[in-house]
């Protein structure tokens, strides 16, 4: 068994692109969505404000769309 056999399945990326592909964190369970009071705040990977919404599902969809639009194939989809 060779440890090199799966290297063909890897893609080249920068360190920043590699951090885009991290798992969600926080209580909401959705990467980039945080609860503030009774509203859900969507932030990007640099903790910059994207939007504030009343509905969690809409906030999760907005965060997913933002990640896909900005990070392409490196966006975390889990």
Image (cartoon, grey):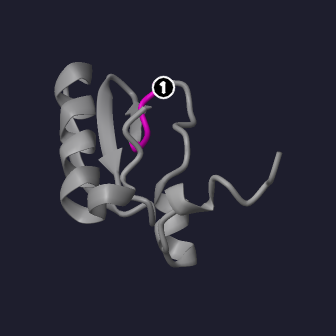
SS assignment at label 1: loop
Q: Is residue 40 left or right of residue 1?
A: left
- Residue denoted by label 1: 29
- Give the residue displayed 79% in from the left and 54% down from the top: 3
**How far across and down, in percent of the image, does residue 28 sit?**
46, 25
Q: Is residue 62 left or right of residue 35?
A: left
Is residue 72 in view from this perspective? yes
Q: Which region of the structure is painted magenta? A: 28-32
**How far across and down, in percent of the image, does residue 78 sit?**
43, 32
**How far across and down, in percent of the image, does residue 53 sit?**
19, 33
Q: Is residue 71 above or below residue 77?
A: below
Badge 1: few (under 14), some or many (20 or more) residues near its Cα, within 10 Å?
few
Please tell me which residue lies in front, 73 or 54: 73
Examine the image and state in which quarter residue 56 appears. top left
Q: Which part of the image, by quadrant, shows the N terminus?
A: top right
Examine the image and state in which quarter residue 32 appears. top left
Please tell me which residue lies in front, 12 or 46: 12
């Amino acid at each position: 068994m060779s440890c090199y056999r799966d290297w063909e399945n890897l893609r080249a990326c920068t360190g920043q692109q590699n951090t885009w592909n991290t798992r969600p964190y926080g209580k909401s369970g959705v990467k980039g969505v945080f609860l503030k009071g009774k509203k859900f705040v969507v932030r990007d990977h640099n903790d910059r404000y994207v939007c504030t919404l009343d509905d969690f599902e809409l906030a999760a969809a907005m965060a997913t769309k933002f990640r896909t639009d900005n990070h392409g194939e490196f966006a975390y989809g889990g």
